[in-house]
Amino acid sequence: MSTPATIATVPSLASPTRTDTDREQVVRRQQIDRLQQRLTTVRRRLDQAYLDKLDGRIPPPAPYPSNRCFLFVSAFLGIRELAD
């Protein structure tokens, strides 16, 4: 007679585990959805920035500082090996 009672308690023990797993899956799915939305937004911005660069809306980068500027800074900092 103890066998039916034992079998009856097994589903009740499995139920909390199943609901915890279900909650974890829901949270994981929400995180994946949020990250996919963020990835879509970042890709869209990169595409738009590339188009803006091609259209000339984004100016070219500034040129590297001249050697004169480097020599001034190195002399100011007391770096003789690089300044000479």
Image (cartoon, grey):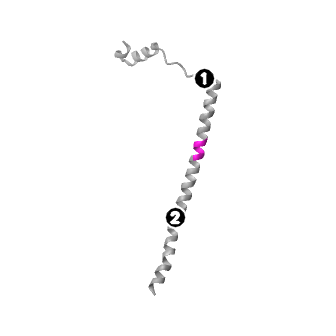
> Is 16 a magenta residue?
no
Give the mark nearest the N terminus, 2 or 1.
2
Report which residue position mark 1 lands on: 59
Say which of 42 and 64 sits in front: 42
Q: Quadrant of residue 49?
A: top right
Per the rendering, the mark at residue 20 is 2
- Tell me which corner region of the image, top left, top right, bottom left or bottom right, holds residue 22: bottom right
Residue farthest to the bottom, as pictured: 1
- With respect to residue 54, does 74 lie above or below? above
Residue at 48%, 83% in the rendered image: 4
In front here: 15 or 67? 15
Density class for disc 2 (Cα within 10 Å; few <14, some 14-19, many ≥20) is few
Amino acid, disc 1: Pro
Q: At 59% from the left edge and 38% from the top edge, which residue is drawn?
A: 43
The x, y position of residue 35, in whole percent, is: 56, 47
**Residues at marks 2 and 1, CA–CA distance in whole angstroms:** 53 Å
Residue 44, label in figure: none
Horizontal and vertical percent for residue 65?
A: 49, 17
Residue 57 visible? The answer is no
The residue positioned 48% from the left and 14% from the top of the image is: 66
Q: Which region of the structure is painted magenta?
A: 36-40
Provide residue 69's location: percent of width, then percent of height.
46, 15
Q: Amino acid at mark 2?
A: Asp
